[in-house]
């Protein structure tokens, strides 16, 4: 077990990238996030989405659409929010302060949010240890390694926690590209379960700030009361309703992302970079010279996600254009050439 504390570092900060690599080739190719580089098509918003307060009817339409898309029992089991990030401390506060166990290593904001809610927060690596929690938190599929916990195991854990007044939180931010048969979205009516779903990652519209919590109806009612009216902005309502209902786009995008992630695996493999896991939105890399690869690509204006507490791993998102693919290939070739020259020099 590891006690969690301190500030959280994230990918996606171009300001930090410029500070780290002031002489890098610009613009940066930002592969440090798991956000889809091929966003849902932009469309003209009705002027009223900006000039008027959101209508309650549009909010109901959004939760109805989200319930169908995610497989929740009904719209009454869904609450919409301005991004899942704002939900984290509220969800952690659903149980009295106690022991919060986070299955890690994983997305660090869950630990921070649970601490804000007053819990003693501990990261555990053993799934079985979560049974001792008052609040158990799992990211499924996991960020950054793509680990998946099967639905049956999650339901057994949820039942044990529910029997003692505990709560299981499952962050399914990447389940849009994961094995959806292991989602707990359809099981939230049993109680003692909160499922979080992120809109921005799969649909590539992270700046829109839209997310959902799925749970039993008393929990949804409580969360909605905390947010009050107009929790979701008008533009987010419009994009959420249209994109979540667009099953054709979603199916085609899943196929496209699978092809792109296979292409990325092959590219890393050509230069001896082992892919240890991930999802079709990001790949998890494990290598002894992770720091060297991060720096070499950064100098070429290509930003990967590094982890200060795990120096031998990196996470790489998908390039979004032919030019970005070419730049990544060129930078990898330069890094591999220097690596191989160094190895030959040592062998002499």
Image (cartoon, rainbow, N blue to C red):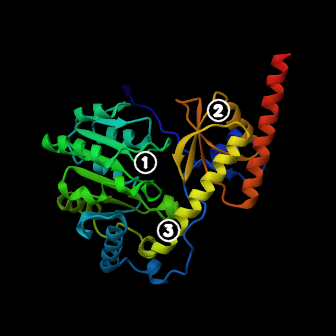
Residue that carries the numbered disc 3 in the rendered image: 251
Q: Are marks 1 and 3 in contact (CB under 8 Å)?
A: no
Query: x, y percentage for residue 263?
Result: 66, 53
Residue at image location 56% in from the left, 49% down from the top: 282
Which residue is outermost to the top?
A: 348
Calculate the distance from the C-alpha at mark 1 to the C-alpha at mark 3: 19 Å
Q: Is residue 23 above or below residue 29?
A: above
Mark identifier at residue 124: none
Q: Of helix, strand and loop, which one carries label 2?
A: helix
Query: x, y percentage for residue 167?
Result: 23, 45
Q: Which label lies toward us, 3 or 2? A: 3
Mark identifier at residue 141: 1
Q: Is residue 147 above or below residue 176?
A: above
Calculate the distance from the C-alpha at mark 3 to the C-alpha at mark 2: 34 Å
Describe residue 247's horizontal placement relative to residue 26 as left or right. Answer: left
Q: Is residue 40 above or below residue 120?
A: below
């Amino acid at each position: 077990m590891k006690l969690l504390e301190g500030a959280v570092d994230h990918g996606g900060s171009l300001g930090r990238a410029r500070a780290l690599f002031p002489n890098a080739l610009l613009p940066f190719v930002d592969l440090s996030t798991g956000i889809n580089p091929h966003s849902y098509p932009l469309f003209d918003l009705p002027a009223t989405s900006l000039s008027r307060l959101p209508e309650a009817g549009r909010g109901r339409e959004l939760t109805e659409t989200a319930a169908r898309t995610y497989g929740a029992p009904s719209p009454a089991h869904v609450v919409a929010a301005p991004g899942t990030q704002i939900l984290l401390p509220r969800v952690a506060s659903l149980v009295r302060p106690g022991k919060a166990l986070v299955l890690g290593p994983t997305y660090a904001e869950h630990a921070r949010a649970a601490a804000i809610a007053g819990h003693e927060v501990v990261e555990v690596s053993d799934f079985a240890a979560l049974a001792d929690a008052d609040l158990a938190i799992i990211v499924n599929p996991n960020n950054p390694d793509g680990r998946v916990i099967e639905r049956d195991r999650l339901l057994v854990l949820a039942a044990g926690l529910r029997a003692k007044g505990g709560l299981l939180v499952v962050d399914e931010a990447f389940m849009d590209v994961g094995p959806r048969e292991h989602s707990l979205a359809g099981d939230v009516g049993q109680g003692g379960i909160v499922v979080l779903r992120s809109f921005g990652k799969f649909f590539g519209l992270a700046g829109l700030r839209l997310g959902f919590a799925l749970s039993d109806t008393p929990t949804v009612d409580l969360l909605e009361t905390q947010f009050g009216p107009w929790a979701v902005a008008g533009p987010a309502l419009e994009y959420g309703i249209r994109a979540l209902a667009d099953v054709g786009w979603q199916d085609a995008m899943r196929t496209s992302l699978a092809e792109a992630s296979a292409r990325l695996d092959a590219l890393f493999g050509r230069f001896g970079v082992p892919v240890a896991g991930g999802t079709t939105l990001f790949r998890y890399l494990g290598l002894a010279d992770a720091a060297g690869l991060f720096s070499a690509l950064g100098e070429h204006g290509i930003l990967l996600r590094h982890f200060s507490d795990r120096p031998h791993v990196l996470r790489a998102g998908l390039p979004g254009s032919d030019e970005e693919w070419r730049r990544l290939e060129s930078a990898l070739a330069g890094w591999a050439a220097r690596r191989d020259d160094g190895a030959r020099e040592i062998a002499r």
